[in-house]
Structure formats: C-alpha cells, structure tokens
Amino acid sequence: MAFFLGQSSFANHFRSYQKTEASMAVPTRAFHVELGDREKALLAKDPSLSRFKSYKKSVSTLKRIGDVLTVVVVAGCCYEIYVKAVMREEARNKAKAGGGSK
C-alpha cells in the first residue's frame, strides 16, 4: 500500500507543497556575522580546563581495549547460541532415528 501511495500524484503534490512551505519559512542562506569579543573569549582555549581533556594516549588505548572486549563477548555469546542450536538439532535427529527404529 505504501508503495502505491509513494507513486501517486497526490503524494508528489503533497511533498512539493511541504518543500515550498519549508523553504519560505527558513532561509536557505544565512548571512555571515563576525564574532564579537565575548564569543571569541568563550571559544578561546582555557588552560585551566586542559587537564580534563581526554586527548591522552591512555584514554584511546583504554577505549580500544573496551571495544575489543565488547567484540569478544558478543562473539562468545553468538558461539554459545550456535553450539546450543547444533546440539539441539543433533538431539532431535537422534530422537527421530531412535523413535523410528522401534
């Protein structure tokens, strides 16, 4: 149903109407305004905050270790689910083979 609605001329007309309304409400180009002294002061580097920045190598190393551990845990979970499914399928096949010979 959504496919036919997407192809209809009514939907195209509605989309074009939305575009014209949005284009009139918000200008597509903004004027460049030079920053004032206060904005420049706010954007300047503050030496007292430098110790809180996480630019050190140890932080990126710790993040990488966390990512690797996450991948290992997810892979282990997937492997366990696979093993359980294979064992269940083998048990089902043995039960069929054992039940059919009696």
Image (spheres, grey):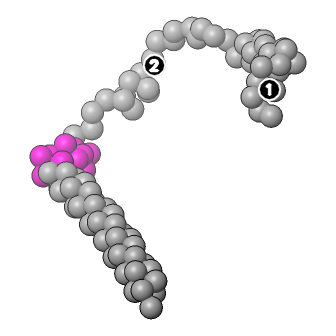
Between marks 1 and 2, how big is the CA–CA gap?
Answer: 53 Å
Q: Work out which residue is located at the far left of the displayed protein and give it.
A: 57
Amino acid type for the residue under numbered disc 2: Gly
Q: Nearer the viewer, residue 32 or 3?
A: 3
Q: Is residue 74 above or below residue 30?
A: below
Q: Is residue 93 above or below residue 76?
A: below
Residue topped by disc 1:
4
Percent x, y of residue 26: 70, 16
Q: Is residue 26 left or right of residue 72?
A: right
Report whether residue 3 is seen. yes
**Residue at 87% in and 18% down:** 10
Total numbered labels: 2
Q: Nearer the viewer, mark 1 or mark 2?
A: 1
Of label 1 and label 2, which has the lower sequence position? 1
Which of the labelled discs sits on residue 36, or is there none?
Answer: 2
Amino acid type for the residue under numbered disc 1: Phe
**Residue at 38% in and 24% down:** 40
Which is the main secondary structure of the residues drawn in magenta? Answer: helix
